[in-house]
Amino acid sequence: MAKKAHYETQPGNGGEAHQQIPRDASHDPEGHLTTSQGIRISDNQNQLKAGARGPVLLEDFVLREKIFHFDHERIPERIVHARGSAAHGYFELYDSLADITRADLFQRAGEKTPVFTRFSTVAGGAGSVDTPRDVRGFAVKFYTKEGNWDLVGNNIPVFFIQDAIKFPDLVHSVKMEADRGYPQSATAHDTFWDFIGLMPESMHMVMWIMSDRTIPRSLRTIQGFGVHTFRFVNARGKSTFVKFHWKPKLGLRSTIWDEAVKIAGADPDFHRRDLFEAIESGDFPEWELGIQTFDEEFADGLPYDVLDATKIIPEEILPVQPIGRMVLDRWPDNFFAETEQVAYCPANIVPGIDFSNDPLLQGRLFSYLDTQLKRLGSANFHQIPINAPKCPVMNFQRDGHMQMMQPQGRANYEPNSLAEAGEEAGPRECPATGFTSFAGRNAADEQGDKLRIRAESFADHYSQARMFYRSLDPAEQAHLASALVFELSKVDLEHVRTRMLANLGNVDTALSGRVAQGLGMECPEPSATAAPVQDLKQSPALRLVRGALELDSLEGQTVGILIADGSDAGALKKLKSEVEAAGARALIIAPKVGSTVLSDGKAIAADAQLAGCPSVMVDAIALVLSEDGTQALTGEAAAVQFVMDAFGHLKAIGHTPACKPLLDKAGVVTDEGVVPIERFAGIAGKRFWDREPSLRTLA
Ligand code: HDD
């Protein structure tokens, strides 16, 4: 009789879409504390001793097991993208894409595929802050019915380097400097700009990282990009090139640099908390997935190479077609088990999706699998519930550290003829439905001599950098130039600064001039270039400030309402309901969190205390204060700073008439963003960019 084989799905997963990973199923229903061997523990407060004041006994296995496990709680953090926050959700397809891909998740309109999405900063360690100027990782694991597909992207559509062999150097240069161990999580230091200056191919990426994209207000307001050109392959074997774009439903929102710096002190977990609170309150973050698709002929007609990860295809040349939406609706049960142990890998693709010859992508295909072994400690890391596919996994890979599968029978090799003897033979390869690599032109025809060489078509390092800079709104150009001044002012090596200025001259001489002036340096001649710099057509789609993705709506934002004893109860109630009706959160802030007595004599509890909740924590402020309240707060530094910062960070300010002395003390000058509270809800969703030139010197 044939034995039943356990080649089925792995522990902790199921077949159905969006199934939850079970909460620790092994717990004792009666709630008893046990050792890891299941022995009930009678006393968790005292070690086993020989007498009340006597020596501790080595036989105390309860103590030893507890300390042993604790000693091993940490695993190596990710060499990059160590700090991250993640959530579960689903991807919902709008319409079938069967004509261009046979990938199962793209076949049926309305189909939902479970996802686990992790956002991250790149340079800082796992315990670093959420708001440094840095690229944000945007990694999505799709648990499809035909296996896991990982789209491991960033919030920026290009990368620093064209070839993966340079990645370790790039990362070493950006991380804390080797001898001194700082700065943590910052590009503003010698070694980063030294490497970048010697790597002109990074100049397009430099424009993006110095723009407001790298100081996002929330993880819910960042874009995501697959970066590389990938392939879709349909059932007939036809290939179409594809680039992936995520667009946030709440639009793009950034911070002002001064604001980002202050958030880092006020709440190092600002982005993680924001994501958590949004999901817990049922305000589920959402992104639309769009694709740019094109063929070889289109690619050949472009003035740059689609295999070069330092280039984009502007949306004005090739529009992004929306194909579905991702909703994140469940916070992980356990941060370590899921967010820390999740293992993304660009090599995880499914039939119907394939790689291109992008040399950066090709290098990544090796690195991620390798790093997971180091990080998670076993070749069986795919069995950890968060990494396990939600479809059958059947193969003859066996054993290894922490093996969770218990296969039965003798079949652990293939081919075998055990079925002829009535034994279970195990799985067989599937030529019709299995993954086949696309064998088209790029895979076959373009092979040549074995050379360490870069294609000529990768030589233009500046044209798209120029296009990006010139496409921005003047306010964002000023932020970008000021960011460069800030960063380079932290560079001690003068020749490194000078080299960067020379490289910037190829992007735009007005930009290099601004930066040189901001640094108080002579601006050198532009450096030599490997290819002529072209004036490409501007792409307004690249704008964040006053761009198509900057929404005026209050939806998803937080309004800080400052109150004190005597505040008008009716005005507060009305304002709160207006803010909430606009889809925003009203956060009541008061000098004392426990109770504030309003004009109607009733006491209410605030959501936050003024000193612990500076205005950088909210998106707009409303001051609902009486004359007495204003007088009390005008002498309170935290209140004056609250208003001064909101104004300086270009936020909307609503106020009751009695607040004037506080506004004056904070240096607020009335403009279209400073309004009576009756008009506040209508304008509170905006930033008032025109205010900025009067407030600070920008490069
Ligand atoms: Fe990478 C992690 C994104 C180039 C090697 N990368 C990592 C993560 C993201 C990216 C989002 C974090 C995933 C998570 O949340 O766990 N990386 C990118 C993008 C790149 C890129 C968009 C260029 C287009 N990466 C890149 C190269 C290499 C690596 C060229 C090496 C040759 N990346 C890694 C890594 C990491 C990683 C060392 C660290 C932790 C991990 O993989 O799981 O293998």
Image (cartoon, rainbow, N blue to C red):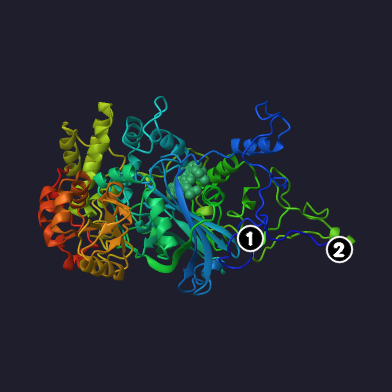
Q: In the visual, does 275 lie left or right of 540?
A: right
Which label's residue is closer to the chain start, 1 or 2?
2
Q: Identify which residue, 295 or 315, lies in the foreground.
A: 315
Label 1, residues with CA under 10 Å away: few <14, some 14-19, many ≥20: many
- Mark 2 residue CB less than 8 A from any atom of ligand 1: no
Q: Identify which residue, 246 or 14, lies in the foreground.
A: 14
Q: Is residue 699 visible?
A: yes
Label 1 secondary element: loop
Q: Amino acid at mark 1?
A: Asn
Where residue 276 appears, as percent x and y from the top left, is: 43, 56
Q: Which mark is residue 416?
A: none
Q: Identify which residue, 639 or 527, lies in the foreground.
A: 639
Q: In percent of the image, x 21 and y 42: which residue is there?
A: 482
Where residue 655 appears, as percent x and y from the top left, is: 16, 60
- Residue 246 location, quadrant: bottom left
Q: Is residue 305 visible?
A: no
* Distance Cα–Cα, label 1 vs label 2: 26 Å
Q: In the visual, does 96 lie left or right of 269?
A: right
Q: Which mark is residue 13?
A: 1
Q: Nearer the viewer, mark 1 or mark 2?
A: 1
Q: Is residue 687 above or below residue 75?
A: below
Q: Is residue 625 above or below residue 341?
A: below
Q: Which mark is residue 2?
A: 2
